[in-house]
Image (tube, rainbow, N blue to C red):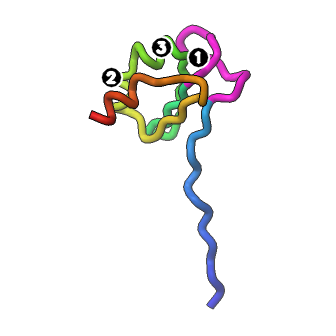
Amino acid sequence: MTPTLTPPPETAAPPAAEERCDRCSAAGKLRVRLAEGGDLIFCGHHANKYADQLVKIAVEVAVAPDFTWRGTEITAS
């Protein structure tokens, strides 16, 4: 029998420097992976503005190292 290696599931990476917010085109600070397979990018302002809704629909989130997302407070409660 030949062993089969299964790659680890892909994880969301924080937005790259050139990626922009889907709402206003500011620098991306948060990447949200959706169950349907798409990603959304948000700037700090919009990430915190929509934090309540994002934690409900996100399968995975990745936050830029220089950003504190309010959604982590919601999910910790």
Q: Earlier in the sequence, mark 2 or mark 3?
A: 3
Q: Earlier in the sequence, mark 3 or mark 1?
A: 1
Q: Which mark is residue 52?
A: 2
Q: Position of residue 10 (x, y in %)?
A: 58, 50
Q: Position of residue 54 (x, y in %)?
A: 39, 26
**Residue at 41% across, 35% down:** 58
Prevailing secondary structure class for the magenta stretch in the rendered image: loop
Q: Residues within 10 Å of mark 1 (few under 14, many from 20)?
A: many
Please state which of the two labelled residues, at mark 1 or mark 2, is closer to the viewer. 2
**Residue found farthest to the bottom:** 1
Q: Is residue 76 left or right of residue 10?
A: left
Q: Tag 2: Cα neighbours inside 10 Å, few (<14), some, or many (≥20)?
A: some
Task: Look at the picture and state if 1 lies above or below 34.
Answer: below
Residues at marks 3 and 1 touching, judged by CB atoms closer than 8 Å: yes
As drawn, 18 above or below 4: above
Q: Residue at x 47, y 19 (%)?
A: 47
Residue farthest toward the top in the current orientation of the protein = 24
- The answer for how far apart the CA atoms under marks 3 and 1 are is 8 Å
The magenta region covers 15-29
- At mark 3, the secondary structure is helix
Residue bearing the label numbered 3: 46
Q: What residue is at 53 percent from the left and 35 percent from the top?
A: 62
Choose the circle earlier in sequence order: 1 or 2: 1
Q: Amino acid at mark 3?
A: His
* Label 1: which secondary element: loop
Q: Position of residue 74 (x, y in %)?
A: 32, 28
**What's the residue at 49%, 35% (across, down)?**
61
Toward the viewer: 35 or 31? 31
Query: Residue at label 1?
Result: 21
Establish if 1 lies above or below 57: below
Tag on residue 36? none
Give coordinates of residue 19: x percent, y percent.
67, 23
